[in-house]
Image (cartoon, grey):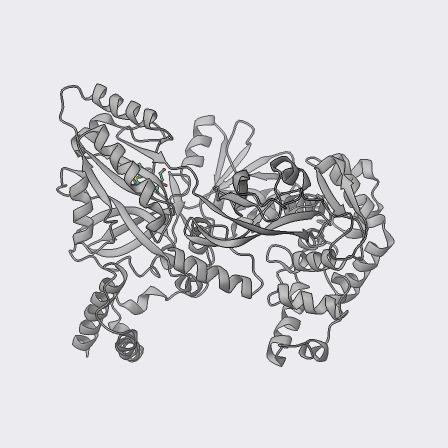
Amino acid sequence: MSNRIAQLVAELNEYNYRYAVLNAPVISDRAYDELMRELIDLEARHPELIQPDSPTQRVTSDLTQQFPTVQHDVPMLSLDNTYSEAELRDFEARVRRELPNEALEYVSELKIDGVALSLIYENGLLLRGVTRGNGVQGEDITPNVKTIRSIPLRLSDAVPFCEIRGEVYLDHNTFDAMNAQREKNGENPFANPRNATSGSLKLQDARLVAERRLSFFAYAFRTPDAQPSTHAEHLERMAALGLPVNPHRALCDTIDDILAFVREWEEKRPTLSYDIDGIVIKVNSIVQQNKLGATAKNPRWAISYKYSAEQAETALHGIALQVGRTGVITPVANLEPVQLAGTTVKRATLHNAEEIQRKDIREGDTVILEKGGDVIPKVVRVVKAKRPKDAVAYVFPETCPACEAPLVEDESEVAIRCVNPQCAAQIKGNIRHFASRTAMDIEGLGKALVEQLVDSDLVRDVGDLYGLTLEQLAGLERMAEKSAQNVLDALEASKEQPFHRVLFALGIRHIGATVARTLADHFHSMDRLRETPCEEIEAVHEIGGAIAESIHTYLADKDNWAIVEKLRKAGVALASEAPADDAPKPLAGKTVVVTGTLSRWGRQQVQDLIRALGGTPTSSVSKKTTLVIAGENAGAKRAKAEHLGIEILDEAAFVEWLEDKGA
Ligand code: IVH
């Protein structure tokens, strides 16, 4: 029995390696699944025989509560960036100056645009996967890392200890498919593969991470044992151990070789199936690397050359107007679909009327697009030479495209907005915001359903959501009874959301999640907030005049208050538990930093506790910090606090101290 299990594990791991690392599958998915099923079955009957590197162990955990913080043995530095050939020449000249009369060799590699990851292997078995974090300490995301099929659970050689560093990324096809699915589900698409990768690695459920189909390239190797003497050999060693190493690299003797590689890949970049944002150049000899050393942030033996954002040219068919939930009108360009940085682009934001005028963008124009580091592609400029003769300057409409109410120019924000509170587009936007993950988190209430609910007049504001019945929901097109019930369950569950979330969910202008929390912490209830004069709200730390004015005006409006009353009737939380005024406030006036992992409380919980006890939680240690609570694996922050002579309590001492104070 154990023989068969071992055989299946070895065989499946080999097939997996050929599929995920070498991109050369040797058996069909179906045959693979059959063997996998046999293994699952055997392991279920003999759990004592489950091997740590069994492919069934790639997705094991259920919900991970929180990722522990761990310290990197060797800090994860970042690379100094260059943006021009001249800067690159400077780098190479500096290296030559530092190592006079030495023969030099460099390795040029692709700079993969993903998320850095450190892997620890002991006796050839994957022990831990840790994010870069702040470079000194990162998060232990091992259960998620194990779902990445190109990362071997067992190396081909039982090296006693080694650390592998590399980049997790999503290839273009996977990214496109994932975003298409998200749009279908009414979820916001990810801006780019890097954001999607980083979001995926932080998911709390490894089963969801597995669905994301992340990939990995290894680029650094460290072991205390006998080391190869060059970086190039490190790369070969990693490949021999079964790790995916990017094949596109070159040994360069001179700066001209390096520049040739840089230019070659600038050209070939669009042919890759994943994003790169530049080239990394590394001194090949490890002895020379050590001689050159590092600054606090960057090694002196390596540098990156960053490419500028990719551009594409396409036709702009028309300008459409989107009405946001606050009534702001955003013009959007509908484009002839074009490939840009690996994904298909059909739309680009035009920001506002002023932008269209400044760039003189007209329907029918040919435009140059660019995808910067951020979200949606933008129109850089118009190719005037290709402008059709009959193209006319764009005239911004005077009425709302959704409700036809007259539009109003908002001097303070360069925005043009629809100020009709009954505007269907705004109502829909508001409901979507209310239901969104960071607000009331109502699963299943996505874009399509909100459209249906508002268009069929079942819902006019967020207060109506809680009056929906099973018949009404199940009566909608494409809505099965089961899904209808799920939506009702999600609505019911959302009544448990704390008051600050409800306040944020209302979508009041200027009231973001943080401001909502501050207000809830101070006033504890919607009623109290409504009765409080504007000046008093403004007096709260971190609350400015615009915020105070906005919340005051909103709550004073009788239509808005009617919505609040509907929520109250439904049982939504409109107050937080205010500690009784005579409750002890032992942390009053203290600025508190929590670092490391605590056993009694999660991150959020301990911050709430600090607030409830009168303290102010902050994230970084400075001279203003008065107390540091240090949990397991507290690292840099603890050290800094020691250095500054700030009071430090470990978890047990903190609890004892609280009890002492009668809290
Ligand atoms: S070497 C000491 N090589 O770029 C720094 N980094 O700031 C060692 N990256 O976040 C990094 N591709 O994750 C190196 N071939 C490559 C890389 C690479 C991508 C990332 C790395 C880091 C950033 C540099």
Residue 140 locus on image (x, y percent): 38, 51
**Image coords of residue 300 (percent x, y):** 28, 28
Between 629 and 255, the residue placed more toward the observer is 255
Query: In the image shown, does 225 or 277 lie closer to the viewer?
Result: 277
Task: Tell me which corner region of the image, top left, top right, bottom left or bottom right, holds residue 536.
Answer: top right
User: In this figure, what is the number of numbered marks?
Assistant: 0
Whether residue 286 appears in this view of the structure is: yes
Is 483 rendered above or below residue 300? Answer: below
> Where on the picture, by quarter, is residue 86?
top left
Task: Determine whether, in the image, residue 270 is placed left or right of residue 311.
Answer: left
Whole-percent x and y of residue 530?
A: 82, 48
Quadrant containing the N terminus is bottom left
Ligand 1 picture quarter: top left
Instruction: Tell me, yes or no, if residue 345 can be seen here.
Output: no
On the picture, is 413 further left or further right than 46?
Answer: right
Tell me the residue at 37%/55% (across/down).
Answer: 171
Q: Give x and y (percent) for residue 382.
A: 55, 40
What residue occupies the far front of the structure in this picture? Answer: 389
Toward the right, the furthest residue is: 558
Q: Nearer the viewer, residue 622 or 93?
A: 93
Q: Is residue 87 depicted above or below 231 in this figure?
A: above
Q: Quadrant of residue 5?
A: bottom left
